[in-house]
Structure formats: structure tokens, C-alpha cells
Amino acid sequence: MSELPVAELDDPSSLGPVPVVAVVGRPNVGKSTLVNRIIGRRQAVVEDVPGVTRDRVPYDAQWNGRRFTVVDTGGWEPDAKDRAAAIAAQAEIAVQTADVVVFVVDVTVGATDVDEAAVRMLRRSHKPVILVANKADNQNLELEAVSLWSLGLGEPHTISALHGRGSGDLLDDILSNLPAPPPILEDGPRGPRRVALVGRPNVGKSSLLNRVSKEERAVVDSVAGTTVDPVDSLVEMDGDIWQFVDTAGLRKRVNQASGTEYYASLRTAGAVEAAEVAVVLLDAGEVISEQDQRVLTQVVEAGRALVIAFNKWDLVDADRRFYLDKEIDRELKRIPWAIRVNISAKTGRAVDKLAPAIRRALASWEQRIPTGALNQWLTELTQATPHPVRGGRAPRILFATQAGIAPPRFVLFTTGPLDAGYQRFVERKLREEFGFEGSPIEISVKPRKKTGPGGRGKAHG
């Protein structure tokens, strides 16, 4: 068996290998789902039957500005026979070639004899091992993870790879265990920015792609649903090269679709997750629909920069504009930060405004606020508008830091849980002060961990 090649940084001026993280565990504990969560896209094959993953499969990953390779492995079992033995051997090679091992256990099942045998194998490797209690989809299941201390690998990380619960803390711990990788040069060459064109059927996605590329790149038909597979196109727009992906229209929820439409929906979802910014097309002449809302929600939940393009503006009269303004206030009130442009893909009206809007959204998506400036602003904000008193006490925000970009992620260290309304207030004021136009932002709260009844502790990450 050939050894797993260690991925190198794309930047030729960087020195040394990228660190390797192996994800191992017995069959069907959610390893591939976790790998997809780590790399931020649906690439590893996931199916609810054991044995789908057979080989060591490496993927490029990045978190908080650090690159590493994550290796998906097949299910490990002791005393395996035939094909299962080969799969287990591949997993063991992945452990030997890794810098850090993520050992995944199903919290709904608990520690099994196979898990305990795997721990013995992992100890022989002398590699740092992070214990993950997967499928902790709610707080009750998180409590079940206490029993996994018996494996002797320290505190289990309770996560839901499927829903993303706890994945950020896990990635932070993975980074803290990795050897220092080569620095990423911010000024180094980068490829074309990836733009997903998304929207419900027949809003003009293919027409817009043809307009910006100045040629017939995609089939245009008045019949909804002409595009099924995402179509990648490199186009020049406003002096830059962009990688556009024209996707199938999302008609139904993925779990309600069937056949070709089901797979088209999955591929479209994958295109959104692989993109950096999504241009969501809405038909300006029609009422903002539930389908439109679902597309917007998918982009926001994927954490991508967002530009909303109201297409077919050439067909909008004064009456429709009046009602559209009211619809925007009502239907898009949860994403007032989205950048909006009014265009006509058919006539070319205002299509030149699209590239500047995408650039603004991407700049916000990658914006980083210095810690000093962030905390100075936050101190002034909380002094002017403190948290409401609840039960005779008011939690205080002790400190804040920006944990990452793309999208911007902030962590508030507090003396106690914050009201959801106050957290929304902080986000609104953060946007007013620092912008973030066109980008979702994530704010998490870390209440101070108390050492005992009445004791004072420190904020924990």
C-alpha cells in the first residue's frame, strides 16, 4: 500500500508540509459527516449504512487562517476479515501518518468493545488523540457523553457533525494540537473568486450568466428547470476574472424532491457551500415567495456573502415598485444587511453594478476588527446600554474577540447567558459601527465557568 501523500500549500514560497488530521472510528459513527463539516462542503460520501468509505481520502481544510489536510477513513474494527481488514489497515496507516487523530464515537450508543479496542490501537501510535462524541444533537445527548470518560482519552468533545453543534470548539482544539504550519501569505496569488448564482426556477440565472460572459454559456428556456447540473464558467467582469456557477433552481425542500430534482438540489446546495459569495436572483415582477426565502436561508446558513439581485427590472412599473418596497421591508427584514441591486439580465440594465456589489460583500466577509478597537467600542456600548436586569442580576460582557473571518465570527466572554434580544442588539450595533454589508456574522457567547457555588472562575472557550 502506498503511503498517503502529504498535501503541500498552493503557494510555492511556503516551506514544509501541511499538517495532517486523521478522522477514525468504528463504522457508521459519522466520520464522513464530520469531515464534510470540517472542510465546509459536501464532498465526502455520506450514507446511513456502514462501509461507504473504504480508503484513506485526503481533503484540504482551513480554519482560522491555518491550513491542514483532513483524512477520512473507513470504519476500523479489530480482527476484521477480507475487505474489512483492508479498510482497517488503511485507517491504521492514516493514524501513523497523521499529526493529530480525531477519534469519533457515537454518543447515542456509548463506548463499545470496538471503541475500547480502537483506543488501545491509538495508544500504540503515540499520536495526540482528540475524543469526539458525535450525534449529540441536543443537550440531553450531551449529558450522555460523560460515560465516555471511561475510554481514558480525556474530556469528550460533544458535537453534532450533521447540525454543526460544537464543531467550532472542536476545530479550535485540533489547531491547538497541530504543529505550527507554514504561514499563509495574505498577499499571495489567489484564484478567481467563486460566485454561485442561485434562485428558484426561471428567475433568469442562465440569462444573467450569458449576459456577464457575453456569450451563450448556458441554455436559456422559458420552461422552468432547464438547468440541472451546476455549470462552471470563468467570466471577465469589471476587469476581474470570476468563477460563476449557474445552478438548478431550487423548487422544493431537498427531502421533498425526488429523482433528478433531488440530486439537482443536492448539487445546488454543494455549489453554495463551495462558493464564497452567492448572488440570489429574485424576479422583481413577482411576489417574494417561500421558495425565495428558502434559497436565502440556505445561503445565510452556509455562511456565505450575499448579494440579492432583483432581475427583470425592465418589466417593473411604478405600482409594482411600491408594493415591492413593502415586501422587502416585510419579507427581508431578517437580512437587512444584504446588498441589493436592481438589474435586467435580458437588456443588460445595471448589470455593471453587480461586480462592485460582489466586491463589497466579499470585503465584508473577510473583514477583521482589531481586538483593541472591538473591545473599546463594546465597552462604550455596554456602558451606554447595559444588559437588562434578570432575576435581580444583569450579565456583563467581559471581553470580546473575533475568532475568524469568512464569515466574521465573534465570541463574547460574559458573566452569564445573554438574552437573545440583547445579542441581536449587539449584532445590530456592531454592523452600524463596522459595516459588514453583504456578509452574515456569527456571534457566540461564552459564559464564565464557575469553580463552585458562589465561586468565581474564568471564561472558558
Image (cartoon, rainbow, N blue to C red):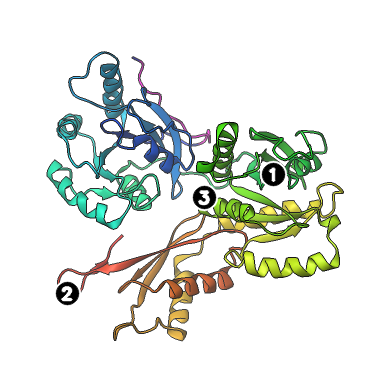
- How many marks the image carries: the answer is 3
Q: What residue type is labelled 2?
A: Gly
Q: How far apart are marks 1 and 3 (CA)?
A: 20 Å
Task: Pick whichever, 218 or 23, lies toward us.
Answer: 218
Q: Distance between the residues labelled 1 and 2?
A: 58 Å
Which of the numbered marks, if any, corresponds to residue 455? 2
Residue linked to disc 3: 302
- Label 1 vs 2, first from the N-terminus: 1
Task: Pick whichever, 233 or 406, lies toward us.
Answer: 233
Left or right of 203? Residue 33 is left
Residue at x 79% of width, y 54% of height: 343
Left or right of 204? Residue 359 is left
Q: Where is residue 202 in the image (x, y as percent from the top left)?
A: 73, 44
- Label 2 vs 3, first from the N-terminus: 3
- Label 1 vs 3, first from the N-terminus: 1
Q: How crowded is mark 3: few (under 14 residues within 10 Å), some or many (20 or more)?
A: many
Q: What stretch is highlighted in magenta?
A: 2-13
Q: Quadrant of residue 290?
A: bottom right
Looking at the image, is mark 2 or mark 3 nearer the viewer?
3
